[in-house]
Protein backbone atom coordinates (compact mmCIF):
# COMPACT_ATOMS: atom_id res chain seq x y z
CA UNK A 1 0.00 0.00 0.00
CA UNK A 2 1.02 3.58 -0.50
CA UNK A 3 -0.57 6.87 0.51
CA UNK A 4 -0.88 10.20 -1.28
CA UNK A 5 -1.69 13.26 0.86
CA UNK A 6 -5.02 14.93 0.10
CA UNK A 7 -4.12 18.30 1.61
CA UNK A 8 -1.55 19.96 3.83
CA UNK A 9 -4.01 19.90 6.73
CA UNK A 10 -5.16 16.27 6.79
CA UNK A 11 -6.03 13.17 4.82
CA UNK A 12 -4.42 10.69 2.47
CA UNK A 13 -5.65 8.54 -0.41
CA UNK A 14 -4.64 4.91 0.07
CA UNK A 15 -3.61 2.97 -3.04
CA UNK A 16 -3.24 -0.77 -3.37
CA UNK A 17 -5.56 -1.86 -0.56
CA UNK A 18 -7.90 -4.77 -1.39
CA UNK A 19 -11.01 -4.21 0.72
CA UNK A 20 -12.68 -7.40 -0.54
CA UNK A 21 -10.56 -9.69 1.65
CA UNK A 22 -9.34 -9.75 5.26
CA UNK A 23 -6.21 -7.73 5.94
CA UNK A 24 -3.03 -9.33 7.23
CA UNK A 25 -1.78 -8.17 10.62
CA UNK A 26 0.98 -6.21 8.87
CA UNK A 27 -1.59 -4.49 6.64
CA UNK A 28 -3.75 -3.59 9.63
CA UNK A 29 -0.73 -2.12 11.40
CA UNK A 30 0.13 -0.12 8.29
CA UNK A 31 -3.42 1.25 8.03
CA UNK A 32 -3.41 2.27 11.69
CA UNK A 33 -0.06 4.00 11.20
CA UNK A 34 -1.45 5.89 8.21
CA UNK A 35 -4.50 6.91 10.24
CA UNK A 36 -2.28 8.23 13.03
CA UNK A 37 -0.32 10.26 10.50
CA UNK A 38 -3.13 11.58 8.29
CA UNK A 39 -6.33 11.38 10.46
CA UNK A 40 -8.43 10.50 7.39
CA UNK A 41 -7.94 7.72 4.85
CA UNK A 42 -9.68 7.64 1.45
CA UNK A 43 -10.19 4.56 -0.69
CA UNK A 44 -11.52 5.35 -4.19
CA UNK A 45 -13.37 3.23 -6.73
CA UNK A 46 -14.73 0.68 -4.29
CA UNK A 47 -17.58 -1.76 -4.97
CA UNK A 48 -17.90 -3.89 -1.86
CA UNK A 49 -20.75 -5.20 0.30
CA UNK A 50 -21.55 -3.70 3.68
CA UNK A 51 -19.71 -6.56 5.40
CA UNK A 52 -16.43 -5.43 3.82
CA UNK A 53 -17.03 -1.84 4.89
CA UNK A 54 -17.60 -3.06 8.45
CA UNK A 55 -14.41 -5.13 8.32
CA UNK A 56 -12.43 -2.05 7.28
CA UNK A 57 -13.89 -0.09 10.21
CA UNK A 58 -12.89 -2.82 12.68
CA UNK A 59 -9.24 -2.28 11.75
CA UNK A 60 -9.46 0.96 13.76
CA UNK A 61 -11.63 -0.15 16.69
CA UNK A 62 -14.97 -1.69 17.65
CA UNK A 63 -17.82 -0.98 15.24
CA UNK A 64 -21.40 -0.35 16.31
CA UNK A 65 -22.81 -2.65 13.66
CA UNK A 66 -26.45 -2.28 14.70
CA UNK A 67 -28.46 0.29 12.72
CA UNK A 68 -30.21 1.51 15.86
CA UNK A 69 -26.85 2.30 17.43
CA UNK A 70 -25.39 4.33 14.62
CA UNK A 71 -24.48 2.19 11.63
CA UNK A 72 -26.80 2.58 8.68
CA UNK A 73 -27.33 5.06 5.84
CA UNK A 74 -27.00 8.81 5.51
CA UNK A 75 -29.73 9.12 2.92
CA UNK A 76 -32.58 11.26 1.70
CA UNK A 77 -34.25 8.35 -0.12
CA UNK A 78 -33.86 5.30 2.12
CA UNK A 79 -36.48 4.95 4.89
CA UNK A 80 -34.93 5.81 8.25
CA UNK A 81 -31.87 7.43 6.72
CA UNK A 82 -29.71 9.55 9.04
CA UNK A 83 -29.77 13.36 8.65
CA UNK A 84 -31.47 13.23 5.23
CA UNK A 85 -31.66 16.98 4.72
CA UNK A 86 -30.14 20.27 5.73
CA UNK A 87 -26.78 21.75 6.53
CA UNK A 88 -24.55 20.17 9.13
CA UNK A 89 -22.23 22.54 10.97
CA UNK A 90 -18.76 21.45 12.07
CA UNK A 91 -18.97 18.87 14.84
CA UNK A 92 -17.47 15.72 16.34
CA UNK A 93 -20.05 12.94 16.73
CA UNK A 94 -21.16 12.40 20.34
CA UNK A 95 -19.13 15.33 21.69
CA UNK A 96 -22.03 15.89 24.09
CA UNK A 97 -21.31 12.53 25.81
CA UNK A 98 -18.48 11.23 27.95
CA UNK A 99 -17.21 9.09 25.03
CA UNK A 100 -17.20 10.71 21.59
CA UNK A 101 -16.96 8.19 18.74
CA UNK A 102 -13.36 7.20 18.04
CA UNK A 103 -13.94 7.13 14.32
CA UNK A 104 -16.47 7.35 11.52
CA UNK A 105 -16.65 6.11 7.95
CA UNK A 106 -18.82 6.89 4.93
CA UNK A 107 -19.13 4.83 1.74
CA UNK A 108 -20.59 6.77 -1.18
CA UNK A 109 -23.27 4.74 -2.97
CA UNK A 110 -25.24 7.48 -4.72
CA UNK A 111 -23.91 11.03 -4.50
CA UNK A 112 -24.76 14.19 -6.45
CA UNK A 113 -22.27 16.88 -7.28
CA UNK A 114 -22.22 19.87 -4.99
CA UNK A 115 -22.51 18.26 -1.57
CA UNK A 116 -19.00 17.74 -0.18
CA UNK A 117 -17.99 16.84 3.34
CA UNK A 118 -15.56 19.35 4.85
CA UNK A 119 -13.11 18.32 7.57
CA UNK A 120 -11.22 20.45 10.10
CA UNK A 121 -8.16 19.22 12.01
CA UNK A 122 -8.50 19.85 15.75
CA UNK A 123 -5.20 18.14 16.55
CA UNK A 124 -3.32 20.37 14.13
CA UNK A 125 -5.19 23.45 15.35
CA UNK A 126 -4.04 22.77 18.91
CA UNK A 127 -0.44 23.18 17.76
CA UNK A 128 -1.20 26.47 15.98
CA UNK A 129 -2.77 28.45 18.84
CA UNK A 130 -1.09 31.75 19.67
CA UNK A 131 0.58 31.68 23.08
CA UNK A 132 -1.84 34.10 24.72
CA UNK A 133 -4.88 32.17 23.46
CA UNK A 134 -3.41 28.87 24.60
CA UNK A 135 -2.77 30.34 28.03
CA UNK A 136 -6.34 31.70 28.21
CA UNK A 137 -7.95 28.29 27.58
CA UNK A 138 -5.40 26.07 29.29
CA UNK A 139 -7.11 24.06 32.03
CA UNK A 140 -10.58 25.20 31.00
CA UNK A 141 -13.48 23.06 29.79
CA UNK A 142 -16.24 23.68 27.27
CA UNK A 143 -19.84 22.52 27.58
CA UNK A 144 -21.21 20.62 24.59
CA UNK A 145 -24.94 20.18 23.96
CA UNK A 146 -26.91 17.88 21.72
CA UNK A 147 -28.64 19.59 18.79
CA UNK A 148 -27.35 23.02 19.76
CA UNK A 149 -27.28 24.77 16.40
CA UNK A 150 -28.06 24.36 12.76
CA UNK A 151 -30.56 21.57 13.31
CA UNK A 152 -34.35 21.31 13.00
CA UNK A 153 -36.11 23.06 15.84
CA UNK A 154 -32.96 23.74 17.84
CA UNK A 155 -34.00 27.21 19.00
CA UNK A 156 -37.54 26.17 19.83
CA UNK A 157 -36.52 23.24 21.99
CA UNK A 158 -33.82 25.29 23.76
CA UNK A 159 -36.53 27.79 24.72
CA UNK A 160 -38.67 24.99 26.14
CA UNK A 161 -38.19 22.76 29.17
CA UNK A 162 -35.79 20.56 27.21
CA UNK A 163 -33.27 23.37 26.84
CA UNK A 164 -29.60 23.23 27.83
CA UNK A 165 -30.43 23.24 31.54
CA UNK A 166 -33.39 20.87 31.17
CA UNK A 167 -33.31 17.50 32.94
CA UNK A 168 -33.19 15.42 29.76
CA UNK A 169 -31.05 17.43 27.36
CA UNK A 170 -27.78 15.54 26.69
CA UNK A 171 -24.69 17.52 27.62
CA UNK A 172 -21.07 16.95 28.62
CA UNK A 173 -18.04 19.10 29.40
CA UNK A 174 -14.64 18.31 27.86
CA UNK A 175 -11.32 20.13 28.19
CA UNK A 176 -10.90 22.77 25.52
CA UNK A 177 -7.50 21.21 24.87
CA UNK A 178 -8.59 17.60 25.25
CA UNK A 179 -6.14 14.69 25.37
CA UNK A 180 -6.85 12.28 22.53
CA UNK A 181 -8.18 9.05 24.09
CA UNK A 182 -5.82 6.89 22.02
CA UNK A 183 -2.69 8.97 21.38
CA UNK A 184 -2.81 11.39 24.31
CA UNK A 185 -1.99 14.37 22.09
CA UNK A 186 -3.88 17.63 22.55
CA UNK A 187 -6.94 18.27 20.40
CA UNK A 188 -8.70 21.63 20.18
CA UNK A 189 -12.18 20.41 21.09
CA UNK A 190 -14.79 23.10 20.48
CA UNK A 191 -17.24 23.06 17.58
CA UNK A 192 -19.73 25.24 15.75
CA UNK A 193 -22.61 22.83 16.18
CA UNK A 194 -22.34 21.67 19.77
CA UNK A 195 -20.19 23.95 21.94
CA UNK A 196 -22.40 26.11 24.14
CA UNK A 197 -19.82 27.96 26.22
CA UNK A 198 -16.45 27.82 27.95
CA UNK A 199 -16.92 27.21 31.65
CA UNK A 200 -15.44 29.36 34.40
CA UNK A 201 -15.53 32.66 32.50
CA UNK A 202 -18.29 35.20 31.87
CA UNK A 203 -20.44 35.01 28.74
CA UNK A 204 -18.64 37.81 26.89
CA UNK A 205 -15.22 36.27 27.53
CA UNK A 206 -16.50 32.85 26.50
CA UNK A 207 -17.81 34.16 23.19
CA UNK A 208 -14.57 36.00 22.50
CA UNK A 209 -12.44 32.94 23.22
CA UNK A 210 -14.64 30.66 21.12
CA UNK A 211 -14.50 33.11 18.22
CA UNK A 212 -10.71 33.21 18.37
CA UNK A 213 -10.47 29.41 18.63
CA UNK A 214 -12.78 28.98 15.63
CA UNK A 215 -10.60 31.34 13.60
CA UNK A 216 -7.70 28.91 14.01
CA UNK A 217 -9.70 25.69 13.81
CA UNK A 218 -11.75 26.57 10.72
CA UNK A 219 -9.09 28.49 8.84
CA UNK A 220 -9.09 27.28 5.23
CA UNK A 221 -5.51 26.08 5.64
CA UNK A 222 -6.67 23.73 8.43
CA UNK A 223 -9.48 22.10 6.44
CA UNK A 224 -9.99 19.62 3.62
CA UNK A 225 -13.05 19.64 1.35
CA UNK A 226 -13.92 16.23 -0.05
CA UNK A 227 -16.02 16.10 -3.22
CA UNK A 228 -17.61 12.65 -3.22
CA UNK A 229 -17.60 10.21 -6.11
CA UNK A 230 -19.51 6.92 -6.15
CA UNK A 231 -17.27 4.24 -4.68
CA UNK A 232 -15.36 6.52 -2.30
CA UNK A 233 -14.85 5.19 1.22
CA UNK A 234 -13.52 7.67 3.78
CA UNK A 235 -12.66 6.66 7.34
CA UNK A 236 -11.51 9.24 9.85
CA UNK A 237 -10.56 9.98 13.43
CA UNK A 238 -13.69 11.58 14.91
CA UNK A 239 -11.86 13.05 17.90
CA UNK A 240 -8.98 14.68 16.04
CA UNK A 241 -11.20 15.84 13.17
CA UNK A 242 -14.56 17.56 12.83
CA UNK A 243 -16.80 17.34 9.80
CA UNK A 244 -19.51 19.45 8.19
CA UNK A 245 -21.61 19.61 5.03
CA UNK A 246 -23.55 22.26 3.11
CA UNK A 247 -27.24 21.86 2.27
CA UNK A 248 -27.56 18.93 -0.16
CA UNK A 249 -29.08 19.69 -3.58
CA UNK A 250 -32.89 19.45 -3.30
CA UNK A 251 -34.75 16.45 -4.69
CA UNK A 252 -31.55 14.68 -5.76
CA UNK A 253 -30.90 11.20 -4.31
CA UNK A 254 -27.95 11.02 -1.93
CA UNK A 255 -26.99 7.85 -0.05
CA UNK A 256 -23.82 6.93 1.84
CA UNK A 257 -23.34 3.93 4.12
CA UNK A 258 -22.20 5.10 7.54
CA UNK A 259 -20.47 3.25 10.34
CA UNK A 260 -19.41 4.40 13.77
CA UNK A 261 -16.22 3.20 15.47
CA UNK A 262 -16.97 3.35 19.18
CA UNK A 263 -17.18 1.30 22.36
CA UNK A 264 -20.69 2.45 23.29
CA UNK A 265 -23.76 3.79 21.54
CA UNK A 266 -25.61 6.98 22.40
CA UNK A 267 -28.31 4.89 24.04
CA UNK A 268 -25.74 3.49 26.46
CA UNK A 269 -24.00 6.82 27.07
CA UNK A 270 -27.13 8.95 27.55
CA UNK A 271 -29.70 7.30 29.82
CA UNK A 272 -33.18 8.38 28.81
CA UNK A 273 -32.10 9.48 25.32
CA UNK A 274 -35.13 7.93 23.65
CA UNK A 275 -37.45 9.76 26.03
CA UNK A 276 -35.58 13.00 25.36
CA UNK A 277 -36.08 12.56 21.61
CA UNK A 278 -39.76 11.79 22.08
CA UNK A 279 -40.35 14.94 24.13
CA UNK A 280 -38.18 17.08 21.87
CA UNK A 281 -40.04 15.96 18.78
CA UNK A 282 -43.30 16.84 20.48
CA UNK A 283 -41.95 20.35 21.20
CA UNK A 284 -40.69 21.05 17.69
CA UNK A 285 -43.52 19.37 15.77
Image (cartoon, grey):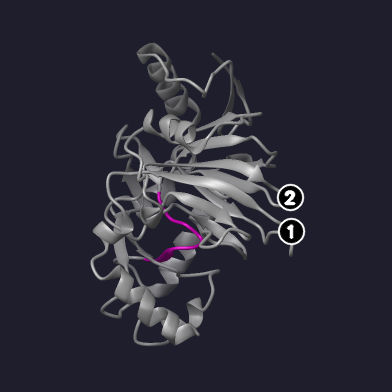
Residue nearer the viewer, 105 or 77: 77
Q: Is residue 264 magenta?
A: no
Mark 2 lies on a secondary structure that is loop
The answer to whether residue 15 is above or below residue 97 is above
Left or right, 147 with respect to 2, comes to left
Locate residue 104: give its quadrant.
top left
| Along the viewing direction, whichever of 69 and 133 lies nearer the viewer | 69
Region rendered in magenta: 189-197
What is the secondary structure assignment of the residue under circle 1?
Answer: loop
Of pointers 2 and 1, the one earlier in the residue sequence: 2
Badge 2: how crowded within 10 Å, few (<14), some, or many (20+)? some
Q: Are marks 2 and 1 in contact (CB under 8 Å)?
A: yes
Residue 200 visible in the snapshot? yes
Q: Which mark is residue 252?
A: 1
**Image quarter in which the N terminus is found:** top right
Pick the residue in front: 260 or 50: 50
Say which mark, if any, is on residue 5. Answer: none
Amino acid sequence: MRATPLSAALGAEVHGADLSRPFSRAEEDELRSLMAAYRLLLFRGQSVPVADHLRLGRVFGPVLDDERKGTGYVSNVRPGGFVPEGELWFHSDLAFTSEPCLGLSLYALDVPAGCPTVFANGARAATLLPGDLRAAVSGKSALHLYDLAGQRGAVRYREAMLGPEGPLAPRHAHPVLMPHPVTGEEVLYVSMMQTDRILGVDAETSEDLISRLFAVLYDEANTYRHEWSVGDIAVWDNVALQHARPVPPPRVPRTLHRLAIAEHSIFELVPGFEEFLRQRDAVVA
